[in-house]
Image (spheres, helix red, strand yellow):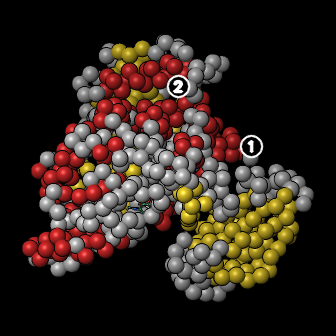
Amino acid sequence: MFLLFSLALCKPVIVPQPLSLTFLSGIWTLVDGTAISYDKSVSGLKEVTQACADFLKAVTGYSITVTEASNVFGIALKASSTQFGDEEYQLISDANLVTIVASTYKGFFYGIQTLYQLLPPEVYANHTITGIKWEAPCVNIHDKPKYQWRGLMIDCSRHFFDVDILKRTMDQIAIHKLNVLHLHLTDDQGWRVEIKKYPLLTELGSVRDSSPKPWNRNQKDGIQYGPFYYTQDQLKELVRYAKTKCITIVPEIEMPGHSVGVLAGYPDFSCTGGSFKVHDMWGVQKDILCAGNPDVFPFLEDVLDEVMEIFDSPFIHTGGDEAPKDRWKKCEKCNKKMKDEGLKSYDELQAWFILHFAKYLESKGRNLIGWDEILEGGLPEGAAVMSWRGISGGQAAAAAGHNAVMCPTSHLYFDYAQHYKAEIYEYICCINTFSTVYAYNPLNKIPEEQQKYIIGTQECMWTEYVWGGEDDLQYKLFPRTCAFCEVAWSEPENKDWMRFIDGFTSVHKKRLDQLNIHCAPFTNSIATLESLNEKPEKRVWKLPNEISMPGTYYALFNVNTHCQINVKDVQLLVDGKLISQDNNEAIVKKHNNLIVKFDIKEPIPSTSTIEISSYVSSSDEYAHGEVYFYFADEQ
Ligand code: TNX
């Protein structure tokens, strides 16, 4: 325990892990009167520098000044003489000066985020802290992101999060060097963006008569939800704020499915004519926008025009997921349209529909991005895909030379539970633990020559079950966002679960506490099960020393993929001595974990070595699983 602690004190913990990091001897100290110099030739840097000074001033109570004259003490932000990437920076410090070198204000912004993490965790406090030495170890860091799209999606339709919550969430993700906030603004359960030309979208579309009941999703609560929506002024303010955090907001307007929010006010855009009410249960609706009604197209173009007026993102998301074709099949207008256009299937009709908007957005200098269903029936040129139903959408897009953002349910759906035990908040189903998120590699199974099309990755926060507002939202986002940021920013070979979890527990969690982030507890994975043989083989895993209290503990074996692992004779050993044992044999497969219970009756001295051992085997050479160990009363 002591060793880990002292290690953390001298080794800075930077989350996400930088590209390269060298410790130098010496300590730099932020003192009263520290000046930050900046290079005025870099556009936007003045504002970034001032924000840094204000931030440090507020927490230290010191006077921190900003200057254009080059510094030899304090902090110097210098434009690089060689061309750096957009978000790339170098941070070199000695006892006198921290120098950050970059080419754009974004590179400096990320260098400054790293500087904050070299300082004590209290730097993130929301009040002035006195009696602390603001010391930072001297380092040489060169850093740039693995991916250009490092996203968080928030579904604002099923539950609404006001502008202040979104701003605070942006603060939190920017610290983790994420740079895209994708807002899912429209769905069957609510339309949340003011569109001046079509007032009924929000007048009728932003109110739900009732919602499912928490923990009892098949019943209705009978309570009106809304009207909840963002005005255009609020959204413009949000975009302005996002820019100060180097975040691009990508708006999503769903089409042709998930559109009952539209139909509530404008039933004529459906195949049947309606009438419709904002849907008051979760799940996919059959009533979608009519592809054969010529009025639907100018309507959506008008909506997109107003959306593009608010948001400056190069990509506009047009949804495209889960659009059942039941109504189209029975619709005269849709069938006629198919015939006229020579389309052979309803999937092709959807592709034709999407193509129209891909072209429209392109004519306005934007690109369309949509959920992976937009691949069905042919992908419009220039369109990018968000791969959510596993990775096949991303694979297909890359193979066809289209950009893709990877956000598979298997790793990055944060409406999935975090723990293998009762949760205090409700989740839709399934599980994506802290370590599952960390283990994800967006380039898995993408051929090397196509990897350039994987422009990024994104965590998705669907909010059907986020009943508890910001607390609930944060709990589901953290700590998983900390794991995700290394997936999105760090080179895969720089990822290391043991290094990460050590830094997280010893330092980074303290930062989250300073930020008042309502963070979920996590369960440690203690080992990875891989390279298994058909013949059972004994494996031994050392446990972290904090397991010393008497009580009930569990070892959990699971697999992420469709494979089977045989496990038998699980033992708990303290200093090599058998404490507890389960000699049954079990087959671990998807949705079939093995959980072994151990009772620890005596306190274990912190100097002891605690180990778990077991015989493991698999006939599948690619079998992959994990072992967890946790105290029963963790929460
Ligand atoms: C699928 S992911 C959806 C959402 C749901 C989500 C719940 C996607 C493009 N569509 O409408 O909220 O599952 O996990």
Report the side of 211 relative to 5 (left or right): left
Residue 384 visible at all: no
Ligand 1 is found in the corner quadrant, namely: bottom left
Report the side of 94 relative to 528 (left or right): left
Report the side of 178 relative to 375 (left or right): right
Q: Quadrant of residue 632?
A: bottom right
Q: Nearer the viewer, residue 211 or 387?
A: 211
State whether residue 305 is above or below residue 596: above
- Counting residues from the start of the chain, the first of labels 2 and 1 encountered is 1
Q: How far apart are labels 2 and 1 at the CA level?
A: 25 Å
* Residue behind mark 1: 2
Query: Measured from the top left, where is residue 375 in percent x and y?
Result: 26, 69
State whether residue 65 is above or below residue 399: above
Query: Measured from the top left, where is residue 410 in percent x and y?
Result: 48, 66
Residue at image point 25% right, 76% down: 329
Query: Measured from the top left, where is residue 531 in percent x and y?
Result: 56, 76
Secondary element under disc 2, as helix, strand or loop, is strand
Ligand 1 within 8 Å of the CB at mark 2 = no
* Residue behind mark 2: 28
Tag 2 and tag 1, C-beta contact below 8 Å:
no
Q: Quadrant of residue 385?
A: bottom left
Mark 1 belongs to which amino acid? Answer: Phe
Query: Measured from the top left, where is residue 503 in percent x and y?
Result: 60, 46
Q: Residue furthest right?
A: 602
Residue at image point 82% right, 53% down: 548
Q: Nearer the viewer, residue 326 or 313?
A: 326
Q: Nearer the viewer, residue 60 or 394?
A: 394
Report the side of 290 relative to 26 (left or right): left
